[in-house]
């Protein structure tokens, strides 16, 4: 995939209407609907402010949550979850949609920009069309939740054409929702068939750092892979074995590797179907000359709880009734040494159950080691990004990705539809 894409700075937007795809899929309080974390809204501000300063009229759009735009499909899905179909009224369905309207986002965005954000009552309907037509240079409006449209997730060309049509004769499409670029939806990819498409600053940064690390890394390239399951990291491990110098394995998936090598893992997380795959990866690493570092020791617990009894055992020697919840001290030392002289480090997935203080030691030690290295440090979204933020090391990382699933697919070497559709430089 070509990572060298045109950006907002490569097009003239003065006096033009710009359809800007953002990632405003923010967490909300279930009871009040209040936004509990506005990081994603803040992340879009540099691109929005640039467009407004350049004299563009901005038509922002985003999805929020997973609304079901069809009443019949909503009833079917709820019934499959065990709900009584007789209790599933149209009024209840409408309330689920109402809870995912964009009003709280528009309000917070207005506060952050210090100017009014005009909110549309629909996505491509009469209200959106009228407000888009009246929008002046330097003004911004926000469309209603894109997933309220049935055609959004199906990448319906008619919906994409209608969205593009809101910008008039000489509009521009700017993609700045990295968290959604791995999905071929109408608002993330389809609209690029009808408008010149470029990236915003957020996607530009993701392509620069993650794309650069994959295409031409400063070496040695060290990849740290954690998290619960081997199955979720198959493609990433496979791809990184082609380009990395060192791959470090931690988290729950380390126990599947330990079992594959003949170890005992007690009650630890285990994917029995992936044992052969783990051995294949170990062999592949040897044949490629890649150092594959597996845990030397493990912190085990007698239950999955923050106050569990714990002890340290050698890797692959976990007794029945116990489960691994963190990497041990020998492993911490080895992993921290491995990143010390790195040129580039990519980290995706915690080393243990970092939500429990007692079992956050390995994750914290790795984060601290990355904060002290002179390497380019890239945190691949999701739980690893949350861990770095929670542990207070976010400011000391070179780049923290804004997309969990997107950054994983990026590291797998997959083509991202929302990036592939952008104009090449």
Image: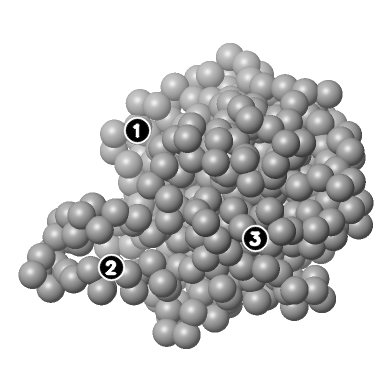
Residue named by callout 2: 93
In the image, is residue 165 above or below residue 69? Answer: above
Circle nearer the N terminus (2, 3): 2
Neighbourhood count class around disc 3 (C-alpha, 10 Å): few under 14, some 14–19, many 20 upward: some
Which badge, 1 or 2, comes first in the chain's sequence?
2
Instruction: Give the x, y percent position of residue 278.
Output: 43, 30
Q: Are marks 3 and 1 in contact (CB under 8 Å)?
A: no
Locate the N terminus and report the quarter of the image it occupies: top right
* Residue drawn at (51%, 74%) of the image: 28
Instruction: Give the image quarter of residue 273.
Output: top left
Judged left or right of residue 34, residue 380 is: right
Q: For marks 3 and 1, give the CA distance.
A: 53 Å
Residue 131: image tag = 3
- Nearer to us: label 2 or label 3: 3
Q: Which residue is mark 1?
A: 274
- The residue nearer to you, when weighing 357 against 102, is 102
């Amino acid at each position: 995939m070509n990572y060298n894409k045109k950006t907002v700075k490569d097009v003239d937007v003065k006096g033009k209407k710009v359809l800007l795809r953002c990632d405003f899929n923010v967490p909300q309080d279930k009871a009040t609907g209040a936004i509990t974390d506005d990081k994603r809204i803040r992340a879009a501000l540099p691109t929005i402010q640039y467009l407004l300063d350049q004299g563009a009229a901005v038509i922002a759009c985003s999805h929020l949550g997973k609304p079901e735009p069809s009443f019949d499909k909503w009833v079917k899905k709820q019934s499959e979850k065990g709900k009584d179909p007789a209790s599933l009224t149209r009024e209840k369905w409408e309330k689920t949609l109402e809870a995912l309207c964009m009003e709280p986002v528009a309000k917070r965005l207005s506060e952050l920009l210090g100017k009014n954000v005009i909110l549309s009552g629909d996505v491509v309907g009469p209200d959106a069309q009228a407000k888009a037509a009246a929008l002046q240079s330097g003004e911004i409006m926000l469309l209603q939740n894109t997933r309220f449209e049935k055609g959004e997730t199906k990448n319906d060309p008619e919906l994409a054409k209608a969205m593009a049509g809101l910008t008039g004769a000489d509009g521009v499409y700017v993609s700045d929702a990295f968290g959604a670029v791995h999905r071929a939806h109408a608002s993330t990819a389809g609209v690029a068939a009808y408008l010149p498409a470029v990236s915003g600053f957020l996607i530009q940064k993701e392509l620069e750092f993650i794309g650069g690390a994959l295409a031409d890394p400063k070496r040695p390239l060290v990849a740290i892979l954690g998290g619960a399951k081997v199955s979720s990291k198959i493609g990433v491990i496979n791809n990184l074995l082609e380009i990395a110098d060192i791959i470090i394995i931690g988290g729950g998936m380390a126990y599947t590797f330990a079992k594959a090598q003949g170890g005992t893992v007690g009650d630890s997380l285990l994917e029995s179907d992936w044992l052969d795959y783990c051995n294949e990866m170990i062999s592949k690493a040897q044949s490629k000359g890649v150092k594959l570092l597996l845990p030397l020791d493990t912190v085990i617990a007698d239950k999955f709880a923050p106050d569990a009894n714990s002890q340290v055992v050698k890797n692959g020697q976990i007794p029945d009734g116990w489960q691994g919840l963190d990497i041990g001290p020998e492993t911490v030392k080895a992993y921290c040494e491995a990143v010390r002289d790195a040129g580039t480090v990519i980290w995706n997935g915690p080393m243990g159950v970092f939500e429990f203080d007692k079992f956050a030691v390995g994750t914290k030690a790795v984060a601290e080691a990355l904060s002290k290295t002179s390497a380019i440090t890239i945190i691949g979204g999701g739980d690893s990004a949350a861990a770095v933020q929670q542990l207070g090391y976010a400011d000391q990382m070179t780049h923290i990705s804004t997309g969990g699933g997107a950054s994983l697919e990026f590291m797998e070497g997959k083509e991202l539809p929302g990036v592939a559709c952008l104009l090449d430089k």
